[in-house]
Amino acid sequence: MLSDAQFSSVYIACGYTDLRCGIDGLAAVIRERFDLTPFNEGEVFLFCGRRNDRIKALVWDGDGFLLMYKRLEDGKFRWPRSSDELRKLTPEQFGWLMKGFSIDPGISRIRPPERVI
């Protein structure tokens, strides 16, 4: 459901979030740490704890909050851990994240083999 949903804006809270927080706690994180309002329809805020196999999503649907929890049975989300910033994702990046890919595309350096047969 979460990967098929269409949102106007997708935000991820980089770094670690205490997933014991419920709706009120996550809404407070959005207001206090990131200085945004969680009351905009179509915006989803994603949070990840220390374990990379589960996330929480908070969405305002006009008359109340919807709290979604996703736990992967096998695999991990590639979550940016570098800071406590809020990042806005493109629809393409959101799709990558839900499929288990990194949202930061990059090219890794590889070394050529020492000996070619």
Image: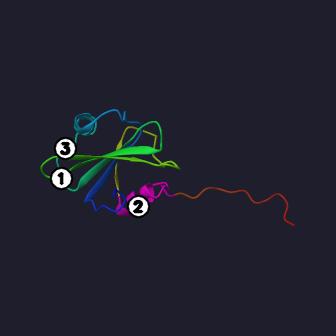
Q: Which residue is mark 2?
A: 95
Query: On the image, which quarter does residue 14 sit in?
Result: top left
| 46 or 66, nearer to the observer | 66
Nearer the observer: mark 2 or 3; the answer is 2
Q: Residue furthest front?
A: 73
Q: Which mark is residue 72?
A: none
For this view, does 71 lie left or right of residue 116? left
Q: Residue 22 appears in which quarter of the rendering?
A: top left
Circle nearer the N terminus (2, 3): 3
User: Answer yes or no: do the residues labelled 2 and 3 have beta carbons within 8 Å?
Assistant: no
Reading the image, the residue beneath label 1 is: 61
Q: Which residue is mark 3?
A: 37
Q: Position of residue 3 (x, y in %)?
A: 37, 59
Is 11 placed left or right of 60 in the picture? right
Q: Determine whether label 1 and label 3 are within 8 Å by CB.
A: no
Question: Which of pointers 1 and 2 indicates the residue nearer the eye?
Answer: 1
Quadrant of res 32: top left
- Classify mark 3: helix, strand or loop: loop
Disc 2 marks which amino acid? Answer: Gly
The residues tagged by marks 2 and 3 sit, at their Cα atoms, a distance apart of 24 Å
Please name which of the two marks, 1 or 3, marks the residue nearer to the observer: 1
Q: Which residue lies at the image location 27% right of the left edge and 39% below the top edge?
A: 34
